[in-house]
Image: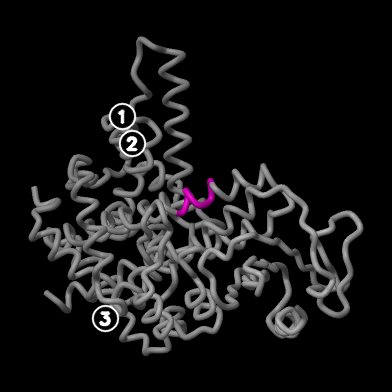
């Protein structure tokens, strides 16, 4: 997993108690974490519960994040460890559910239900086809950012174009994808 | 809205300065529509990264699988996998054939100006992956003509396909068919170079190792001069 320059700022803000930054981090990584946890647990409900727990734990432990790994890698490890603990705990105490959460801790934003996080397979295919048909300049900048995790500076150097051009190409790609998702009524419900 | 989205996109990528970032984090927290859009950017990232990872993992599987069958080929397998993964990240391959869209390749080569990227992309022929696989599957030791060995290189007594000048290592593999490769092609992955050399007798010689074109070029010239 590539390091994400953007997370330095988010982490710094969260560590200083900025709940808006925490919310942005949840919005950013919830889809990825849900996808990983659904893959791991094979249960949407369990993944949803673990996702909530994970972000609570992230909020509690963010001061211990030193940036030795990418932020998502750290979040992912927390999530998977919680999932393992859940399995162990439900095995040992089959009559009881998992430990109750510390409800007095910070609440994880609830606006986005997991049902709306994961896209149906056929819609995924449509979106990927749409991305593959973006014009080459837009697609290249977008792919270098999303897949390779390159910074705008690095992409500008690779493509030998101004950083503003990179920023607008990546924005353009996202704008077109979002418009396409709207048009196809994907994630609008 | 365009301006908002452009700023949001840059915030998502961590490309805003601290002051701008704080202002926009606050804007998101107060605006459901922006919040929803920011979340969708996360959904798109997840989707794109997962789809790319799935395709790349197929190549890694091939790489791991053939490494077990043919440990000597570790370098070339890794090199081929690296090249293919890079290409897969940029293009959608037909899963079965690993074909490259040549037109896009050319366009992208123009767009990507680094020499390495150009070399990788210009030389990604549709048959390369099949060829790599056939090399990996082959366990046989081939008889290499002395004429092919570059000046200064000597055979490794423990591996008749490996040649070294003390600094660089070169491996040869000979195939009885040319897989549609009509002229010399080469590509680079990390420190390894792979040269595909169609011979006049209809066979295909693959030379690979940490041998740069400056060393390989005279070797290739001499292969064509000496019949």
Q: Are marks 1 and 2 in contact (CB under 8 Å)?
A: yes
Decide whether the magenta segment is chiefly helix, strand or loop: helix
Q: Residues within 10 Å of mark 1 (few under 14, many from 20)?
A: few
Give the camera-side residue of A16 and B175: B175
Using the image, tell me which numbered label, if any, was put on residue A168.
3
Using the image, tell me which numbered label, if any, was put on residue A43.
1
Residue found at x 71% / y 84% = B221
Residue found at x 49% / y 70% = B124
Q: Are marks 1 and 3 in contact (CB under 8 Å)?
A: no
Q: CA distance from mark 2 to mark 3?
A: 34 Å
Give the residue number, with chain letter if any, for mark 2: A38
Stretch of the chain drawn in magenta: B56-61
Q: Position of residue A129 (x, y in %)?
A: 24, 60
**Could you say which quadrant of the image residue B210 lies in?**
bottom right
Q: Position of residue A127 (x, y in %)?
A: 22, 57
Q: Residues within 10 Å of mark 2 (few under 14, many from 20)?
A: some
> Is residue B57 found inside the magenta-colored segment of the image?
yes
Residue found at x 21% / y 63% = A130
Q: Earlier in the sequence, mark 1 or mark 2?
A: 2
């Amino acid at each position: 997993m590539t390091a994400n320059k953007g997370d330095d700022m988010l982490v710094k803000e969260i560590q200083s108690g900025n709940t808006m930054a925490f919310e942005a981090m949840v919005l950013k990584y919830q889809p990825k974490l849900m996808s990983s946890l659904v893959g791991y647990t094979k249960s949407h409900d369990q993944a949803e519960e673990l996702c909530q727990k994970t972000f609570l734990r992230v909020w509690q432990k963010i001061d211990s994040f030193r940036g030795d790994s990418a932020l998502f890698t750290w979040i992912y490890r927390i999530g998977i460890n919680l999932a393992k603990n859940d399995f162990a705990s439900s095995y040992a105490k089959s009559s009881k559910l998992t430990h109750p959460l510390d409800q007095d801790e910070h609440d994880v934003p609830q606006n986005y239900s997991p049902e709306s996080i994961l896209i149906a397979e056929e819609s995924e295919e449509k979106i990927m086809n749409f991305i593959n048909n973006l014009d080459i300049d837009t697609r290249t900048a977008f792919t270098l950012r999303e897949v390779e995790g390159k910074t705008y500076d690095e992409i500008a150097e690779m493509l030998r174009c101004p950083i503003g051009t990179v920023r607008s190409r990546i924005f353009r790609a996202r704008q077109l994808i979002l418009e396409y998702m709207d048009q196809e009524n994907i994630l609008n419900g | 809205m365009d301006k908002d989205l452009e700023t949001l996109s840059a915030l998502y990528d961590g490309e805003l300065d601290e002051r701008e970032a704080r202002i926009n984090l606050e804007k998101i927290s107060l605006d459901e529509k922006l919040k929803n859009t920011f979340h969708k950017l996360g959904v798109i990232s997840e989707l794109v990264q997962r789809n790319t990872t799935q395709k790349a993992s197929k190549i890694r599987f091939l790489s791991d699988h053939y490494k077990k069958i043919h440990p000597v080929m570790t370098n070339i397998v890794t090199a081929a996998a690296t090249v293919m993964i890079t290409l897969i990240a940029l293009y959608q391959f037909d899963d079965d054939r690993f074909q490259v869209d040549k037109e896009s390749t050319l366009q992208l080569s123009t767009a990507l100006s680094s020499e390495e990227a150009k070399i990788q992309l210009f030389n990604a022929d549709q048959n390369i992956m099949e060829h790599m696989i056939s090399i990996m599957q082959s366990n046989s030791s081939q008889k290499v003509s002395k004429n092919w060995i570059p000046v200064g290189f000597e055979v490794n007594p423990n591996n008749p396909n490996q040649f070294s000048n003390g600094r660089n290592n070169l491996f040869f593999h000979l195939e009885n068919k040319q897989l549609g490769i009509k002229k010399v092609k080469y590509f680079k992955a990390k420190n390894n170079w792979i040269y595909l050399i169609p011979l006049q007798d209809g066979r295909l010689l693959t030379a690979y190792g940490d041998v740069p074109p400056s060393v390989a070029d005279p070797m290739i010239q001499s292969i064509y001069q000496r019949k």
